[in-house]
Amino acid sequence: NNNAKINSVELSVSEPRDLSGLVDILFANMLAKAIIELKNIFLASLVKDGELILSGLLKDQVDEIYSCYEKEARVKQKRELNGWVTLVLQKNAYS
């Protein structure tokens, strides 16, 4: 991505279990069940105050996902379109 190069942003794509090191932003577009199962891996991969962007969620799945993450992260932003939801969670500084 040219914009990433201009801004010195490193982009990488990997399987969740292959994540290594800490990242500022983690993007996941997958089934709700996997998002819940991978919570510990996702949170361990984020820096303090890092952001986890979860997309492709059905509106009726959001409460279950958030209740899984609420102790370690807060909802920074929520967007909904035609029954689909994207959540931006921010990892707590103390997590």
Image (spheres, helix red, strand yellow):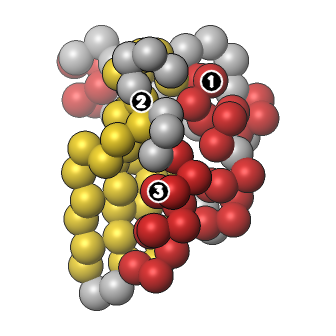
Asked if labels 3 and 2 touch by Cβ distance under 8 angstroms, the answer is no
| Residue 86 percent location from the top left of the image | 35, 62
The kind of secondary structure element at disc 1 is helix
Type of residue at label 2?
Lys
Residue at (65% x, 55% y) in the render: 36
Cα distance in 3D space between marks 2 and 3: 12 Å
Secondary element type, mark 3: helix
Residue 9 at what x, y percent from top left? 34, 18
Please indicate whether residue 15 sits to the left or right of residue 7 in the image: right
> Which residue is most to the right?
17
Q: Residues within 10 Å of mark 1 (few under 14, many from 20)?
A: some
* Callout 1–callout 2 Cβ contact below 8 Å: no
Q: Quadrant of residue 94?
A: top left
Q: Is residue 26 above or below residue 24?
A: below
Reading the image, the residue beneath label 2 is 91
The Cα–Cα distance between marks 1 and 2, rounded to whole angstroms, is 10 Å
